[in-house]
Amino acid sequence: MVFCNSACSLCCLVVSSWGIIQLVVMGIFYWFHAVALLEDIPIDESKHDMSAHEFYHEADIGYQTAAMNCWIAACLYILSFVVSGHQFYMNSRTHT
């Protein structure tokens, strides 16, 4: 069953492949606690009397959550890649 043309499916293949690469790499960086990504993790900044131990604990939880979110989004891009690849295959098969 074809529901998008070959140009659309090829575009989705390219975007999905880039999304997979980017999100997997970002997930790895979050997993290994890249300092450059510290501002992107959710930390409750309303606690002004937070000790260093509490801050590191909140940062660890934030890094792990962000890494899991990146990997889940990469899995969704894999699903999109498979569907787009199927559509590209079906379009190339019907035009020959």
Image (tube, rainbow, N blue to C red):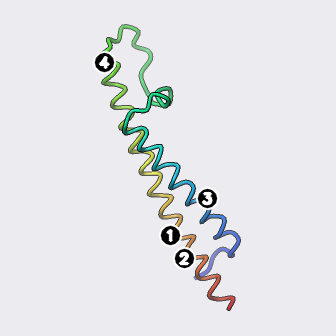
Q: Around disc 3, counting alpha carbons within 10 Å, would you say few (fewer than 14), some (14 to 19), or many (20 or more)?
A: some
Q: How far apart are marks 2 and 1 (CA)?
A: 6 Å
Q: Around disc 4, counting alpha carbons within 10 Å, would you say few (fewer than 14), some (14 to 19), or many (20 or more)?
A: few
Read off the residue under disc 3: 15
Q: Position of residue 77 (x, y in %)?
A: 51, 58
Read off the residue under disc 2: 86
Task: Specify which label sits upstream in the sequence, 1 or 4.
Answer: 4
Read off the residue under disc 1: 82
Residue at the (69%, 88%) spot, across then down? 95
Q: Which of marks 4 and 3 is in front?
A: 3
Task: Specify which label sits upstream in the sequence, 4 or 3.
Answer: 3
Mark 1 and mark 4 in contact? Answer it, CB < 8 Å.
no
Q: Distance between the residues labelled 2 and 4?
A: 48 Å
Mark sitting on residue 54: 4
Mark 3 and mark 2 in contact? Answer it, CB < 8 Å.
no
Q: Distance between the residues labelled 3 and 2?
A: 15 Å
